[in-house]
Image (cartoon, rainbow, N blue to C red):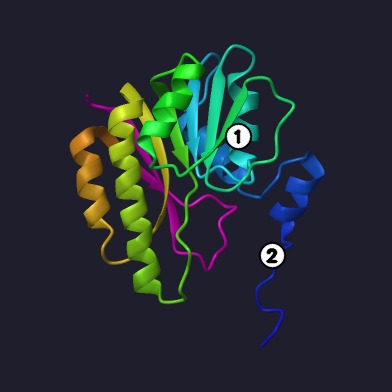
């Protein structure tokens, strides 16, 4: 039946009205309102950034002295914001990413965010486990690029295998919190994992 899945909901319309590139901006805004992750002067890395709504929110919060780097395999349209740097690359190409960071005089970040989602197959279990695998890889990437006591935000498709991700996070971080922001669609399996206080 057509018309069951309505993309242009109130969050979509609000994003357009406020100049955000996607409704996902409101997910990060709500997460930050609850956990107070973003502060002026921070250095933040956003993975799987396209089209860039997380970058817009982060840039506003860390301005003017903070910096934000966005990486995605797809092209991200440039911003006027001078504190945003962009790289089009596979987010797991560690050598290329490290080289790019060196040109920015950056090596580690106070916060890493990700709104990554796998290419979906329509098979819930398969899509969920692909989400787990992607996020496990991001957790390992954070081992390298996130400062000690830094925080990590992940989007996760939650299903029965979620503990395969929960356990590695709890080994590495002081606290794991989970939430589903209001801007998430009701039928979505997605949650956000807020990993607080990297231990090493």
The mark found on residue 5 in the picture is: none
Along the line of sight, the residue nearer the viewer: 59 or 74: 74
Where disc 1 sits, the SS reads helix
Where disc 2 sits, the SS reads loop
The mark found on residue 7 in the picture is: 2
Q: CA distance from mark 2 to mark 1?
A: 22 Å
From this viewpoint, which residue is outermost toward the bottom?
1
Q: Position of residue 111 (x, y in %)?
A: 43, 28
Q: Which residue is mark 1?
A: 55
Q: Position of residue 148 (x, y in %)?
A: 29, 21
Task: Please give the name of the residue rendered at 42% of the width and 33% of the height, measured from the top-left corner.
Answer: 96
- Examine the structure image and report whether residue 198 is included in the region drawn in magenta: yes
Image quadrant in which the N terminus is located: bottom right
Task: Please give the name of the residue rendered at 59% of the width and 11% of the height, measured from the top-left corner.
Answer: 65
Mark 1: few, some, or many residues within 10 Å (few <14, many ≥20)? many
Read off the magenta span.
177-200
Q: In the displayed structure, would residue 183 be above or below residue 9?
A: above
Q: Position of residue 139 (x, y in %)?
A: 31, 41
């Amino acid at each position: 039946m057509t018309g069951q899945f309505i993309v242009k909901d109130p969050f979509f319309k609000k994003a357009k009205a406020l100049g955000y590139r996607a409704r996902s901006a409101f997910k990060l805004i709500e997460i930050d309102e609850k956990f107070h992750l973003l502060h002026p002067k921070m250095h933040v890395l956003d993975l799987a950034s396209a089209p860039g709504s997380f970058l817009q929110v982060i840039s506003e919060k860390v301005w003017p002295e903070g910096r934000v780097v966005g990486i995605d395999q797809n092209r991200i349209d440039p911003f006027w914001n001078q504190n945003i740097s962009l790289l089009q690359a596979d987010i797991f190409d560690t050598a290329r990413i490290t080289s790019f960071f060196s040109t920015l005089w950056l090596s580690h970040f106070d916060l890493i965010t990700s709104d990554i989602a796998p290419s979906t197959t329509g098979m819930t279990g398969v899509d969920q486990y692909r989400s787990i695998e992607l996020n496990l890889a991001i957790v390992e990437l954070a081992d390298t690029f996130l400062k000690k006591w830094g925080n990590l935000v992940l989007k996760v498709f939650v299903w029965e295998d979620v503990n395969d991700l929960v356990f590695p996070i709890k080994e590495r971080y002081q606290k794991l919190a989970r939430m589903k922001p209001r801007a998430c669609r009701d039928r979505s399996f997605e949650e956000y994992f807020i990993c607080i206080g990297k231990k090493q």
